[in-house]
Amino acid sequence: CAAGNASAGGGGAGACDGARVDWREPLAPHEWPAHYVPIRRIKFTTIEDMIDRMKPLAEAGEPLIFEGTEVMNVSQWASVDHIREVLAQSKVLVKTSKNNKFRYFDVSKNIGGFKFDRPVEETHRTVAEFIAESERILEEGEPQRMYLQETLSGHSEMVDEFSSWRWELLIRVSSACGWGLPDSNELFIGMPGVETPLHFDERENMFFQVRGRKEIVVFPFVDYLRLYPFPTTHACDRQSMVGTPVSPDREAFPRFAGAAGHYATLQAGDLLYLPYGWWHWLRNLEHLAVSVSFWSTTPPADLPNGVPDEFTDHMLTRARRNLESMLARQHGPEQHNQTMVGLRDALLAGNERDPVLLQVRGLLRALKMPLDKQDQFVLETIEGRFGIDWSRHVKG
């Protein structure tokens, strides 16, 4: 099986990732549907120029790749010895999957009591142990894959490494865009072909590709309905049930066909601005591809001038999540599915005396949403997401 270009409509290169091929050869990125567009690239010149370019993009919430920022020393990270040594003998989080997909989950957030089987196993190993075991798996042609994901706060052994990073650039850009300081960093190191299924983060992300190549596809936050998120009370909250844009289940997720994908192949030295809420899917094209996320908080989405006459799509997307979470809190998270399905049934039956529907009507009136738009808003929030078998879609 060759790792050639693949159509986004089939298994393609992703289907070859577990086969016994020369794992030292890089995989090819996928070919994407014609309505997807490449993420715009700009060569870095100065911090001042970067700020001028970033401010309108941050306000509009649009991704952008800067080339040559030198946030980290990519030449140094090209050495496998450096990767082994940078965290010394510290034990770091290593995930193992039976295939190449690494779905994020948080069991503590499964307050809805959904049936849930962990899609990956989590252990703690040294970086040297991770590298040795991953290469053994590849040499022996075994199907499982490993992915290292470690939060870097508290790693005092990395003080020299941290001091070499270009914090001035990151801090000045974050400040100019009105975000909080970059206060959280995550290190990602993976085997070839490993995928992170579609999900979104509720923070601003400056994502630096340190070593190797990684392909990424992103979708706007406002494509929320087209990405079919798990319920907010599920362990996979903020994760898309679609999982992969490569071979989506179009019968289960028909709205995904209208999602507006933006794609790129990140090279070592690329800095990607990933705005708050943007859905993203990633796949390593090379062994030991390394990335680091620099996350900043977003100011609260308050309404200093009161409720606007008309909500933006971004505001309405946040309103969907807030409405769903509020109903779960008030009617019991363990009854979340029944509450949402009952709301749908009451609406379709025209039962305006249903207490949950009355509550929702009042909330949507407070948002100045016309009655003729409320039904569609509620039904779209529920359809394809509740009253289904969620476990089918956990693996991604």
Image: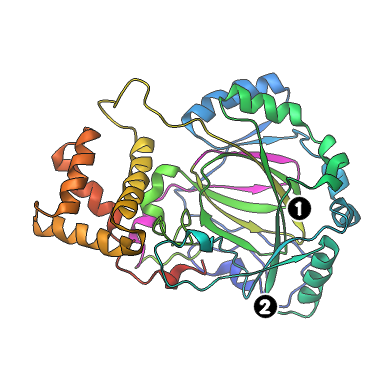
Which amino acid lies under the numbered mark 2 shown in the image of this protein?
Pro
Up-down relation of residue 52 to residue 270 (above or below): above
* SS for callout 1: loop
The stretch in magenta equals: 252-276
Please give the residue where the numbered disc 1 appears in the rendered image.
Answer: 212
At 63% across and 53% down in the image, what residue appears?
Answer: 215
Instruction: Report how far apart the C-alphas of labels 1 and 2 lie in the structure.
Output: 22 Å
Q: Amino acid at mark 1?
A: Gly
Q: Can residue 195 be seen by looking at this rendering?
A: yes
- Residue found 82% across the figure and 61% down from its top: 127
Asked if residue 30 lies left or right of residue 300, the reply is right
What's the residue at 59%, 67% (across, down)? 101
On-image quarter of the N terminus: bottom right
Q: Nearer the viewer, residue 329 or 192?
A: 329
Q: Is residue 351 left or right of residue 240?
A: left
- Decide which of tag 1 and tag 2 comes sooner along the chain: 2
Where in the figure is residue 194, as x and y percent of width and height?
65, 64
Disc on res. 227: none
Please rate how many residues cluster around mark 2, counting C-alpha atoms within 10 Å: few if below 14, some from 14 to 19, many from 20: some
Assess disc 1: are there few (<14), some (14-19) or many (≥20) residues with their C-alpha within 10 Å of its C-alpha: many
Q: Is residue 62 positioned above or below 321 on the image?
A: above
Q: Secondary structure at mark 2?
A: loop
Residue 259 lies in magenta, yes or no?
yes
For the residue pair 61 and 7, the one nearer the viewer reads as 61
243 drawn magenta: no
Nearest the eye: 301 or 215 = 301
Please name the colour scheme applied to the rendered image. rainbow
Q: Position of residue 356 (x, y in %)?
A: 19, 53
Q: x, y (%) of residue 216?
A: 59, 51
Q: Which residue is mark 2?
A: 143
Q: Residue at x 62, y 28 (%)?
A: 174
Q: Is residue 168 above or below residue 157?
A: above
